[in-house]
Every structure is written in C-alpha cells, then in structure tokens.
Image (cartoon, grey):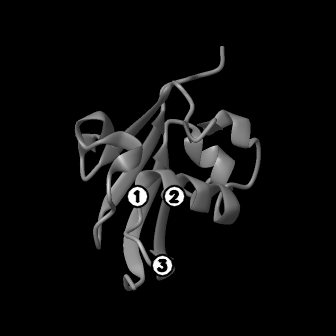
Amino acid sequence: MAAPLAIQLEFGGGAELLFNGVKEHHVTLPSQSEPWDMKQLLVWIQQNLLKERPELFVQGDSVRPGILVLINDADWELMGELDYQLQEQDNVVFISTLHGG
C-alpha cells in the first residue's frame, strides 16, 4: 500500500477561475494500492477541487487542448503525460493558453 502523497498543484492563465480563483493548492492524495499517475490525478481534481465548468478543464480522460501541463517545470509530454507516476512533493502546473476575446 502506497503512503499518502503530498503534492502541489498550480492553476494559471485563467484556469484558476475554475477553482474559485485559487492558484495554488497543497494537496495530500489518499493512500492507494498502486502509485498515483496523472490520469488518476485528473479524476481526483475533478471530484475534489474543480468547482465549475469541467468541460473547460478536461476532455475525455485528459486535459483539454489548450491547457499546458508542467510537472516540476518540465512539459508533461516529456514525462509520459497520463502515465507519469507522481512522486512526493511533485509540483504540477496547469496553464490555460485559451483566452476569450
């Protein structure tokens, strides 16, 4: 059984508006039998943090196009995207590149 996992989440570029305007969240993910991965994290965020309009954050089982995801300051595409296994104290940043006009 994996221990609870403490990570930091950040939302920017307008994405924070979906989370009551809160940019930084220090969260502890509950213990589970397998290591946490990004796919599971997105489900957890939807169930626990996302306050409104989930269609602006997720599409299918990933983030919607136009949201940049960084894991410890590296593009998540270099880290395995949804398959990346989260580590203690990881910093995951979601930045919306979509702006209304």
Location of residue 61 (image quadrant)? top right
The residue that appears at 65% across and 55% down in the rendered structure is 46
Instruction: Give the residue pinned by disc 1.
Output: 37
**Mark seen at residue 97:** none
Q: Tell me: 10 left or right of 51.
A: left
Q: CA distance from mark 3 to mark 2?
A: 11 Å
Mark positioned earlier in the residue sequence (3 or 2): 3
User: Which residue is outermost to the right?
Assistant: 52
SS at circle 3: loop
Where residue 15 sits: x, y (%)? 57, 41
The residue that appears at 64% across and 54% down in the rendered structure is 19
Badge 2 amino acid: Gln
Location of residue 57 (image quadrant)? top right
* Label 3 neighbour load within 10 Å: few <14, some 14-19, many 20+: few
Q: Tell me: 44 left or right of 13.
A: right
Instruction: Give the residue pinned by disc 2.
Output: 40
Q: Is residue 23 visible?
A: no
Between 73 and 62, which is closer to the camera in this rendering?
62
Mark positioned earlier in the residue sequence (1 or 3): 3
* Label 1 neighbour load within 10 Å: few <14, some 14-19, many 20+: some
Instruction: Give the residue pinned by disc 3.
Output: 32
Taking 63 as reference, is 34 above or below it?
A: below
